[in-house]
Structure formats: structure tokens, C-alpha cells
Image (tube, rainbow, N blue to C red):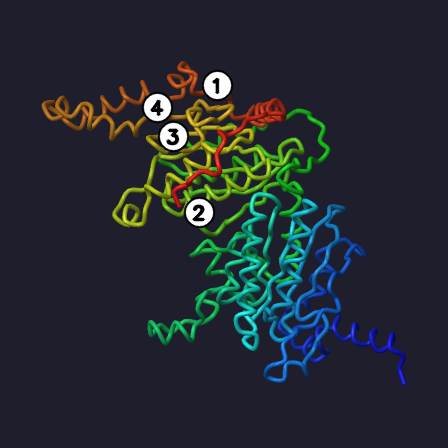
Amino acid sequence: MKEPFKILKDKIAEAQLGGGKSRIKAQHEKGKLTARERIHFLLDEGSFEEIGQLVTHRTTDFDMDKQLVLGDGVVTGYGTINGRMVYVFAQDFTVFGGSLSETHAEKICKIMDLAMQNGAPVIGLNDSGGARIQEGVRSLGGYADIFYRNVRASGVIPQISAVMGPCAGGAVYSPAMTDFILMVENSSYMFVTGPNVVKTVTNEDVSSEDLGGGLTHATKSGVTHLLAGNDLDCIEKIRKLLSYMPQNCEDKPPRLPFEVGDEFREELTDIIPPSSTQPYDMRDVVNGIVDYESFLEIHSGWAENIIVGFARIAGRSIGIVGNQPMNLAGVLDVNSARKSARFVRFCDSFNIPLLVLVDVPGFLPGTDQEWNGIITNGAKLLYAFSEATVPRVTLITRKAYGGAYDVMNSKHIGADMNYAWPSAEIAVMGAKGASEIIFRKEIQEAEDPAAALAEKEAEYAEKFANPYRATARGFIDEVIYPRETRRKLIKAFAMLENKVDTLPKKKHGNIPL
């Protein structure tokens, strides 16, 4: 007869295998890692300390008391990533489909409470079929307990969710309230109602992948911020993403050692095309400014007319927001405003300075935009920048027209330093449209209206399609040559490093949601 301690060790070993070798084998055949393997690759070697390993569910209905598995389908604990403390939970799909029970939720809540108390990021590796039906309302209450903590932790500690399997029904709202969501192509999906319900209610035939797969949420809905090719790629992206963030809202982002040298970048000199209507890739500007290979783009496949992401300048972590002339000429629309507003607010929450690259001809016109709330959504970005107290630097590379000039971190809404390249055009609107309005009568009465329009267009462009009038008023701090941009930005962010700014005393603002 085995000793009690030996029996306990055997049970723990079985729990660590996720409830059985056959189910683990099936997991691997699908190209997925187990919960413990995911934690193993996520955290530094030997740093993981598990909490709640012997917890089991308390349900006796439906013969559930005969199906006790140690850990109850979720592995929770803490460890380090590159030496920094993090808290982590990983749902185990091989145990009751990773379904959430009352005790399962308690384990996750315990980890979130510890993360809040100790000021460290929390990472959730989600792989669950949803609420455990056998528990009824107790399972639903467990979800609500988690949701409540997501909200309490928002803006206090970084929260990262990796959806590495199914995430359906109420389960989707916890990742949705965290700061970043990562998904894995062809093996993870998120939706409130599944394909069968959709078919019943709307008579639409749709697969799980098309309805809520990683590619769908990375390109159509914007729900997911980063898309990974497999579990290991997802884990590597989590580690990289975390490297740009501080431990909590009272900490500063990690800074890498850097020795400033010759920071001129000649490749930026000819990056702006001769024609103002010709596109260029704003990513080329970003890569010419930031430290080598330091740019991590967020939401790269959604709202592509604006780019956001993290990078480093002279070892400092910064957030970047930039209009993308390669897509819709870089205009602001509903989705791009939402995308960038969310990113700006995250950076402001966690003391990450902001660099804004501007080439924007205005807001996208049309009934689709107006009916879908371009007014409210554009106001979100305006609100986010106006509210931000972190160091904020703007560079206008080419166009800055109309209200979009104001919204894109102008001096008028609190930007600290505003630069412009000589190619910058700062005006209410483009020269052609402005000339047609201002000189309408003269053009109509001219013998050759086309020639008159061209003449007036050139006159307007000479007067307004440059950065010097704005500079004379102090709205632009300096007109700089493209090649010296990186050097100027390094100095600006160094100067702003100890910036202190506070908002008026209030409970919270009322952002136009």
C-alpha cells in the first residue's frame, strides 16, 4: 500500500499532465502546447511558483464529485520574465474543456489580487469552453468576480490576455477589458455567440474561424492587437510586448543602455515624394527615427490608415502614433480614431512618452462615416491626447489640414514639443479646395477659369502650404531637416524625462464613448 504522501505526489503528477496523457497527445497533435508548457516557455527558467495546485471544485451535482482533478482546470502562480515579477494564469483545456467553475475563478481572482497588491503585470493564457454548466449561477458569478478585478486593475497594472484556444460567451469580456489581446491563427477564436446560435437567429452560415478567428479579429473587428502564428510565437510576442512597459502606473518603463553617437539619418532626406499627392510608407520614417529594430507595431492589420506601436529612442521606451499615407492617404476615420485613442490612453496610464507623426489631410468624408459616429469617435482621440500628461512630441512630415491638425497632438491641446519638416503643409484645407472657395467669384469671371484657378492655387500654396506661418506664431517650435530628426527627438525626450503635470481634481472624466 502506498504512503499517503506518495499518493498525493502521484495525484499532483497527474494534475500536471492536465488530466491524462491521451488528452495531452491530442492537444499536441493540434499544434497546441499544454497549460504548463505555455507557462514554462513564458517565464524565466525555474522561476515559476504555483499557487492553488491542490484546489478541486465543490460541485456534487451530476456526479461531478466523482470527477475531481487537482487544480480544477487552471494553473496559477507567479514568476519572472527577464527578471521582472509577473503573475500568470493558464487555463487547461484538457480538464473539463477549461470551463470556469467557482473555484477556478477563485484561483484567477487570487492571482489578480496579488498582482494589484504587489504592483506587477498579470498575464492570462485563455483556453476555455466557457462557464461550467453543471455549476449554474456560481460559474457566472465567478466570471463577474474576474470582470470586476479587470476594471479595478485597469490603468494600475498592465494586463495582457493571450487567447490560445476557444473563448466564447461571457468569457470574452475579461480579455476585452485588459490592455492587450493576442490570438493564435487557426487555433483560437472569440465570439459572444457561436456559429450554431448565429445560424438559428440570423440564418447565416459561418465557421468559427470566420466568425471569431484570429485573422478576423486582427483585420475586421480590431479586437485582437497582435496575431501569432503558433503558441510559441504568441509567447514570444508577450515577452517582447512586456519589455516596453513598466511594472505598474507608479513605475517608469524599463530603459536599455544606450550611448549617443552620430544620430543623423541621411535616409530620411528623400523620404517625402516631390508630389504632395504621392504616398510613402510612414513605417520608413519610424524606422529611420527609432533604435534599430525596436519598433513593435500594434493592430497592424486593422485601421491601416494609422500606425501605432512601441519603440525605443536612445534606449527609452516610447509609444508612436502616425498617420499612414499608404492607406486612404492617412485620413482619420472611425476605426483609426478608436485605435489610436485606446493606444494613447494606455501609454498615458503607464508613463510611456508619446511621439506623434503627422501627415493627415483631414477626416474621411461620407455618409458611412457620419452615420457610424465619426464625430464621437474623432472626439475620443482628441480627448485622449488632451488628457495625456506624459511627455508628448509631435513631428509634422507633410500635411496637417483642418480639424485633424488640432486632433493629432497639436500644441493647442498640450503637446510639449512640436517639430515640422520643411515639407510640412499646415492649413485649414488643401490649396485647390481653399482656392475654389476663397476666389470663387474671381475664377468664375476670369476669361480662362482653369488658368485662374491654377494661379490662385499657387498663390494660396505659397502663403499657407508651409510650416513657417505656424512657426512664427509659436505653434511649431522648430522647422528641422529630416536628417536631424532622430537627434532632435533624443534631446527632446531627454529634456522632458522629468515632466510633471496633473489633471484637475475629479473622480474621472467622461470620455465620449
Q: What residue sits right under mark 1 in the picture?
A: 477
Tag 1, which secondary structure? loop
State yes or no: discs 2 and 3 in contact (Cβ < 8 Å): no
Name the one closer to the observer, 484 or 151: 151
Q: Which tag is nearer the camera, tag 2 or tag 3?
A: 3
Q: What residue sits right under mark 4 in the picture?
A: 465
State yes or no: discs 2 and 1 in contact (Cβ < 8 Å): no
Residue 425 in picture, x, y percent from top left: 37, 26
The structure residue drawn at horizontal position 65% and vertical position 77%, both measured from the top left corner, is 26
- The image's mark for residue 304 is 2
* Residue 264 visible in rendering: no
Label 2: few (<14), some or many (≥20) within 10 Å? Answer: many
Q: Earlier in the sequence, mark 2 or mark 4?
A: 2
Q: Which tag is nearer the camera, tag 4 or tag 3?
A: 3
Q: Which tag is nearer the camera, tag 2 or tag 4?
A: 2
- 497 on left or right of 209: right
Which quadrant is the N terminus positioned in? bottom right
Say which amino acid is labelled 1: Asp
Q: What residue sits right under mark 3 in the picture?
A: 405
The structure residue drawn at horizontal position 64% and vertical position 69%, both measured from the top left corner, is 31
Q: Earlier in the sequence, mark 4 or mark 3?
A: 3
State yes or no: discs 3 and 1 in contact (Cβ < 8 Å): no
The structure residue drawn at horizontal position 44% and vertical position 22%, both measured from the top left corner, is 422
Q: Earlier in the sequence, mark 3 or mark 1?
A: 3
Say which amino acid is labelled 2: Glu
Q: Earlier in the sequence, mark 2 or mark 3?
A: 2
- 19 on left or right of 169: right
